[in-house]
Image (cartoon, rainbow, N blue to C red):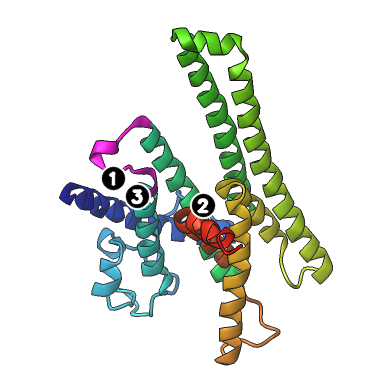
Amino acid sequence: MVLTFLNLGIIFIFGAVLGSFLNLVSDRVVKGEKIVASHSRCDKCGKELKALNLIPVISFLVQRGKCSFCKTGLSWYYPFSEILAGFLLVLAAILSKFSVVDSFSIDSLIGFLFLVIVFSFFEILLLADLKYLLIPDKIVVPAIIFVAFFHISTTVANLYDYRNRLQNDDFGRYLLKAGFFENQVGTALRALGFNFGSAIAIALFFLFIVWVTRGRGMGGGDIRLGLLVGLVNGFPYNLLAVFLGFFIGAVVSIGLVITHKKTLKSVVPFGPFLILGSLICFVWGAEILNWYFNLF
C-alpha cells in the first residue's frame, strides 16, 4: 500500500511537469506558433524563462504569482494546468491499475498510456476552450483518429490472441470447429459498432443544435469534441457523459447568471463541461447507470 502511494506521488509529479507543457500547447496551437522550437517566455516582458522559473507549481508559489523579471501577475492557468494534469495521470494510473505492483501487466501499461494520451488531449482542449472559446482542430482531429485506431486495433489484437489460445487447447479446437469463435467475432464487432455508431449519433445531435441555434448555442468544435467523447467513453457511457455535460453546464451557467458574473447573452464554453462529464463516467459511470436503472 505504501509503495502504491509512493508510485502515485511520482506519477503526480510527472503529471505536473506534463501539465506545464500542455498549457503551453493550448496557447501556441491556437496562436499558430511552433510548439517545441521556441523557449518559454513571459507573455508581458518577453524575457526567456529559466529552469528555476519553470518548476511546476513551486515556481508559481515562490514567485508569489508574479514574473520574476517584470513582476507582472501570472495567470492562474499555470498552476491549474499542472495540478490538473497531475491528478489526471494519477486517475489514469488508478483506472488502469498501473500503480499497483502486484497487478502490473502489459495490459495495465497499455491502458495507462492510452488514458495518459487521451487525458492530455482532454486537458489541451479544456484549456483552449476556457481561454479562447475554441476547440482547435489541430488537437481534436488527431485525438479522434488516435482513439478510433486504438479501439479497432485492440479489438483485432484481442480476437487474434483469443483465437491462438483456442488453437493451443484441445477443447478450444473443438470450439473453433463448432463456430464459437465466429460468434465471439460477431459480438466484438457489434460492440465496436455500438461505440462508433453512438459516437456519430452524438456528433449529429450536436450538429443539429448548431443548425437550430445558428451557431449561437454551440460551435463546430463541440461537434468534433462530442465525437471524441463518444469514442473515448463508449456506449452507453458516452450518452451519460453528454447528459452530465449538459446538466453540469446548465447548473454552472445558472449560478453565474444569479451571481451576476455572466448574463443570459454571455458565451460559456461547453467543452470543459463535456470533458468533465466524460471523466466522471470513467470513475462512476457504472454506478450512476446502475443507480438510475434501479429506480424503475
| Residue behind mark 2 | 121
Q: Is residue 101 left or right of residue 124?
A: left
Query: In the rendered image, which residue does mark 3 sit on?
Result: 94
Crowd rating for badge 1 (residues with CA inside 10 Å; few <14, some 14–19, many 20+): many
Q: Say which element carries label 1.
A: loop
Secondary structure beneath label 3: helix
Q: CA distance from mark 2 to mark 3?
A: 19 Å
Of residue 293 and residue 226, the one placed in the foreground of this image is 293
Answer few, some or many: residues within 10 Å of disc 2's Cα (few below 14, many 20 plus, some between 14 and 19): some
Q: Give the mark nearest the N terminus, 2 or 1.
A: 1
Classify the position of the C terminus by image quarter.
bottom right
**Do callouts 1 and 3 mark residues in contact (Cβ within 8 Å)?**
yes
CA–CA distance in space, label 2 to label 1 = 22 Å
**On screen, residue 211 above or below 110:** below
Q: Amino acid at mark 3?
A: Ile
Range of magenta residues: 94-106
* Residue in view at x 57 percent, y 64 percent: 295
Which residue is labeled 1 in the image?
A: 99
Residue 158 in picture, x, y percent from top left = 51, 26
Visible residue check, residue 150? yes
